[in-house]
Image (tube, rainbow, N blue to C red):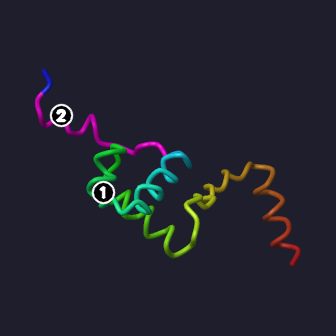
Amino acid sequence: MQTAFTNIYERMGRSKELSEFKHDKVIDCHLCNKSIHKISLLLNISRSTVSGIITKWKQLGTTATKSRSVRPRKMTERGQRMLKRTVRSQ
């Protein structure tokens, strides 16, 4: 049985990154003097996301996403032995 409470949590979660096209559409609408609320409704994006895109564009002059750091891989046993050997020799 699904209730409204469980439906909320099923919908929550991380969404995918917006495309460059959508970023550009947000900026185009902003340059046409549309409000953040109106842009949000037109493109079906949250107001905070629209606001963030516009702020980033004003500060950096670009809407491109920065590359993210990746979690380092777990060191293998061989790598651990080599590291211990290097630390002991120093």
| Viewer-closest of 17 and 63 | 63
Residue 40: percent from left, percent from top: 31, 51
Query: 7 or 76, which is in the foreground?
Result: 7
Q: Position of 66 compared to 76: left or right?
A: left
The magenta segment? 3-17
Name which residue type carries label 2: Thr
Please report the residue visible at 58 percent of the width from the left and 65 percent of the height from the top: 62
Residue 56, percent across and down?
A: 49, 68
Q: Is residue 41 left or right of residue 58?
A: left
Above or below, comparing residue 57 to residue 43 in the picture? below
Query: Which amino acid type is marked by label 1?
Result: Arg
The correct choice, above or below, for 48 with respect to 61 in the image is above
Mark carried by residue 87: none
Q: Position of residue 49 (x, y in %)?
A: 37, 57
On whether residue 60 falls in the magenta region, the answer is no
How many angstroms separate mark 2 from mark 1 (CA)? 25 Å
Dot 2 corresponds to which residue? 6
Measuring 55% from the left and 61% from the top, which residue is drawn there?
63
Give the secondary structure at mark 1.
Answer: helix
Q: Which residue is mark 1?
A: 47
Disc 2 secondary structure class: helix
Q: Quadrant of residue 5?
A: top left
Q: Earlier in the sequence, mark 2 or mark 1?
A: 2
Quadrant of the drawing holding the C terminus: bottom right
Q: Nearer the viewer, residue 12 or 61?
A: 61
Residue 70: x and y in percent read 63, 55
Which residue is at 41% across, 64% downward? Answer: 52
Extreme residue in the top direction: 1
Say few, some or many: other residues with alpha carbon within 10 Å of mark 1 (under 14 / 14 to 19 / 20 or more).
some
